[in-house]
Image (tube, rainbow, N blue to C red):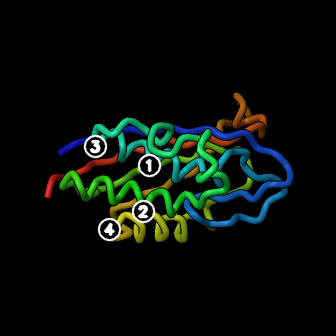
Amino acid sequence: MRIGHGYDVHQLTEGRKLILGGVDIPWEKGLLGHSDADVLTHAVMDALLGAAGLWDIGHAFPDTDPDYEGADSLVLLDRVMEMLCSKGLHVGNVDATILAQRPKLAPHIPQIRSNLAVHMSVDVDRVNVKATTEEGLGFTGAGQGMAAHAVCLLEED
């Protein structure tokens, strides 16, 4: 067994889509980044890569590479899964938390979980996603950005 932790943060800005776990969430702001800036999927990928000893998404998909500009993070997750498979690893489970003051994310979590589960080839009950505010504190509480933490368990084939 291998355990990994991932963390990501992106600034909120107008004129961008808000995508979390591959779900386009209607809201007045989106996340700024080189790819689609899906902060949740990025944290999950970092946890998976870390558990596998494969550095992080910055090494796997550098933001200096134009090939990843506007990239769909679920497609990048597919590539991470290929890397894990090549090392004889598969996902045991993932538990993630999104830190965001607004918008309310609870209605979107079932689809987010489903998307991540499909792309990691696991049953949805092996993917848990939670959302929390920070009671108005810090950059997430002030609505300046969003962050996500993820932990994972990888198992060897």
Marks 2 and 3, the one that precedes in the sequence: 3
Task: From the image, tell me which residue sits under label 3.
Answer: 52
For discs 4 and 1, the disc positioned in front in the rendered view: 1
CA distance for labels 4 and 1: 15 Å
* Residue under the image location 84 percent in, 56 percent down: 28
Marks 3 and 4, the one that precedes in the sequence: 3
Amino acid, disc 1: Met
Q: Secondary structure at mark 4?
A: loop
Task: From the image, tell me which residue sits under label 4.
Answer: 122
Amino acid, disc 3: Ala
For discs 3 and 4, the disc positioned in front in the rendered view: 3
CA distance for labels 2 and 3: 15 Å
The circle drawn on residue 78 is 2
Marks 1/2 in contact by CB < 8 Å: the verdict is no
Task: From the image, tell me which residue sits under label 1.
Answer: 45
Marks 4 and 1, the one that precedes in the sequence: 1
For discs 1 and 2, the disc positioned in front in the rendered view: 2
Disc 4 crowd rating (10 Å Cα; few below 14, some 14-19, many 20+) is some
* Residue under the image location 79 percent in, 55 percent down: 16
CA distance for labels 3 and 4: 17 Å
Q: Secondary structure at mark 3?
A: loop
The circle drawn on residue 115 is none
* Residue under the image location 35 percent in, 58 percent down: 81
Indicate left or right for 83 with 43 as reference: left
Indicate left or right for 124 with 18 as reference: left
For discs 2 and 4, the disc positioned in front in the rendered view: 2
Marks 2/3 in contact by CB < 8 Å: the verdict is no
